[in-house]
Image: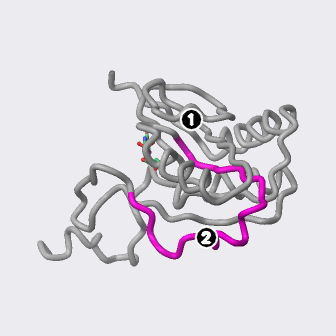
Amino acid sequence: SDERENLTYTVFGQAIRELAQRVADDGYEPDIILSIARGGLFVAGGLGYALDVKNLHVMNVEFYTGVGETLAMPVMLPPVPNVVDLSRKKVLIADDVADTGKTLKLVQDFCAAHVAEARSAVVYEKSHSLVKCDYVWKRTDQWINFPWSVLPPVHRSGEAPKENKEAL
Ligand code: 5GP
């Protein structure tokens, strides 16, 4: 259908508190939060404050090639978090949405080999996701508009966006 799930920054603020409450109620006390950039950065920052976890790591996972074509599988971009740092840590993986679940699967597989325990928290999980996350705020099968990516990038005032520059 054409229906979209529209997440606003205001509702996102409530969602993060509720997601954190689920983690806390479950008794999971992560040592570190591992965010999957870029969407996961917002989620990880919010969970970090709500769960009082100061140790945040970032993992860059790319699902697209430079020319905008989707890869068959997501790939991890360097630098990869230091395995020695994480070997005895309880990790909470944070991302915006588990859609196909391929991105989270990649990070979970990395964690399975390198950390003591890993659980995952997402704002949204779709029903076809191959990964079932431990903590989910809301389930949907619609396309989600996230507040941080719904608008195009800004450009210098008075200047056309990059795509249109050639035409002017
Ligand atoms: P995956 O398919 O590997 O689970 O999702 C990879 C990434 O694609 C997500 O982290 C997210 O950035 C993006 N993505 C997947 N589904 C949606 C969606 O419904 N809306 C938006 N805005 N991005 C999505």
For label 2, count other residues whose C-alpha is less than 10 Å away and answer few (under 14), some (14-19) or many (20+). some
Question: In the figure, is residue 77 to the left or right of 166?
Answer: right
Q: Amino acid at mark 2?
A: Pro
Disc 1 under 8 Å from ligand 1? The reply is yes
In reply to whether residue 94 is colored magenta, the answer given is: yes
**Extreme top residue here?**
1
**Label 1 to label 2: alpha-carbon separation:** 25 Å
Q: Which mark identifies residue 124?
A: 1
Which residues make up the magenta segment? 75-97
CB contact under 8 Å: marks 1 and 2: no
Q: Where is ligand 1, by quadrant? A: top left
Where disc 1 sits, the SS reads: strand
In reply to whether residue 59 is colored magenta, the answer given is: no
Residue at 80 percent of width and 51 percent of height: 30
Residue at 72 percent of width and 57 percent of height: 33
Q: Position of residue 3 (x, y in %)?
A: 40, 25
Is 127 in front, or is 117?
A: 117
Question: In the figure, is residue 162 to the left or right of 91?
Answer: left
Q: Which quarter of the rendering shows the N terminus?
A: top left
**In the rendered image of this protein, does residue 159 appear above or below residue 45?**
below
Q: Which quarter of the rendering shows the C terminus?
A: bottom left
Residue at 42 percent of width and 68 percent of height: 154
What sort of colour scheme is used for the picture? one colour
**In the rendered image of this protein, does residue 93 appear above or below residue 60?**
above
**In the rendered image of this protein, does residue 145 appear above or below residue 163?**
above
Residue located beneath label 2 in the image: 81
Q: Position of residue 119 (x, y in %)?
A: 69, 43
